[in-house]
Image: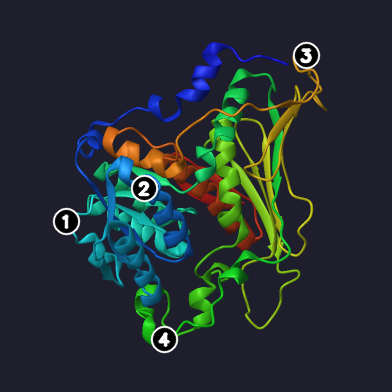
Amino acid sequence: MPRLSRRTFLKGTAGVSAMAMTARSYGRVVGANDRILLGQIGCGDRGCHAHMTGIHKHDAAQNVQYIAVADPWRVSREEAAGLIKEWYGRDAKQMASYRDLLAIKEIDAVMIASPDYHHTTHLEAAARAGKHVYVEKPMAKRLDRLLSAYDAVKQAGVIVQVGTQSRSQPSSFGLRALWRSGVLGKASRIEQARNGEKPYWYHYLKTDVRKEDVDWDEFLMDLPKRPFDANLFSGWYGYRELSDGPVPNLGAHFVDLVHFITGATFPTSCVCIGRTSTWNDDYHFTCPDNVEALWTYPDGFVMSYSSNLGNGTGNRLDFYCDKGTLKMEALWGQATYSALGGPKRDGKIRGEHHVEPIECPDHFLDWLQCLRSGKTPVASIEAGLHHSIAVLMAMQSFDSGRRTTYDPQKRTIVEG
């Protein structure tokens, strides 16, 4: 089995601690003995059961406490407020609008788990309010709003962690160290198929959402006005106005993980096709249940992502390289590598080997630690920009039927 040099190992384990601290972010760090006060924007399944419970694992050790929650649905914000009462013995401030939460001066940082089409609006507003941010992926649904939010973050100097938590896995740090060792050589193709028997958006449909419990205008934001629709409200993952389906929702994790492992940033070009093949029904969902995207990178490889949400077999995540092949079980599973298929294999890999994990903080803890140190989180605003450009290229190609390219100097996506 090939051994990684100490220098390569240290490069792979350095992670967040080696990332530069900007002067502006250092000026906004929270004091070592000061309590970090948090607000939660978006209190649904992801907000309550991922963000809040994930933070709660660390809140005592990190001296952190939630004090406010915002959500258009009364039921969700009351559930979130109930957790705050249970954990900290205090009543939470509750509001329907993120604007009211951001106006609370005591709040140091916010966590954003709102619908996809809200992310950039909430992120930009939080940055302009001087709050540090944890924001869910996909970070953006529109290029103009992505760039506006990104620029606001850079200008404010706030610390942002993007919710591509696959970076903060011991297996991911191990994969990056292996990649940097050069033992696999150069990649020609990297691909993932992430399938399921039914689209994930059906899981979120609710029959108990009442109009009188929802601030419908706050939910719609700047979308065209229309009568209250419980299916649109609870099943927003399945409607293109609010979300773009599997490529940005599931594929963003894969795209970001490839960037993290290989060091790639912006794709050069993309083509994407798909349709609804299986789940045509009375809900009239508009996100595709069958989709595939292909990107080219200046690094020399092609990256492929596909989802068939009409059949749950065929899941894979593979790196095909000139000295061997890296295979993973799904996205966060065990990874193995061998010389299989490598046209330039050099005898350094003999047999099949497991990728050794490298311990790291979980994604929430990494963010909390950076709020005090001023260091850059593992999934920084730049990482969010990179994965967002990739998925925006894909969805523009999906809609136009044409190949898209990206110019990083002009920050434009062009068809043709």
- Describe the element under mark 4 as helix, strand or loop: helix
Callout 2 touching callout 3 (CB < 8 Å): no
Q: CA distance from mark 1 to mark 3?
A: 60 Å
| Residue with the mark numbered 4 | 211
Q: Position of residue 324 (x, y in %)?
A: 76, 25
Looking at numbered disc 1 in the image, what kind of residue is underneath it?
Lys
Q: Position of residue 138 (x, y in %)?
A: 49, 54
Q: Earlier in the sequence, mark 2 or mark 3?
A: 2
Q: Earlier in the sequence, mark 1 or mark 4?
A: 1
Q: Earlier in the sequence, mark 2 or mark 4?
A: 2
| Residue with the mark numbered 3 | 346
Q: CA distance from mark 2 to mark 3?
A: 43 Å
Q: Nearer the viewer, residue 165 or 305?
A: 165
Looking at numbered disc 2 in the image, what kind of residue is underneath it?
Tyr
| Residue with the mark numbered 2 | 150
Residue at 61% across, 63% down: 399
Looking at numbered disc 4 in the image, what kind of residue is underneath it?
Lys
Q: CA distance from mark 4 to mark 3?
A: 65 Å
Above or below for 257 versus 148: above
Q: Nearer the viewer, residue 31 or 393?
A: 31
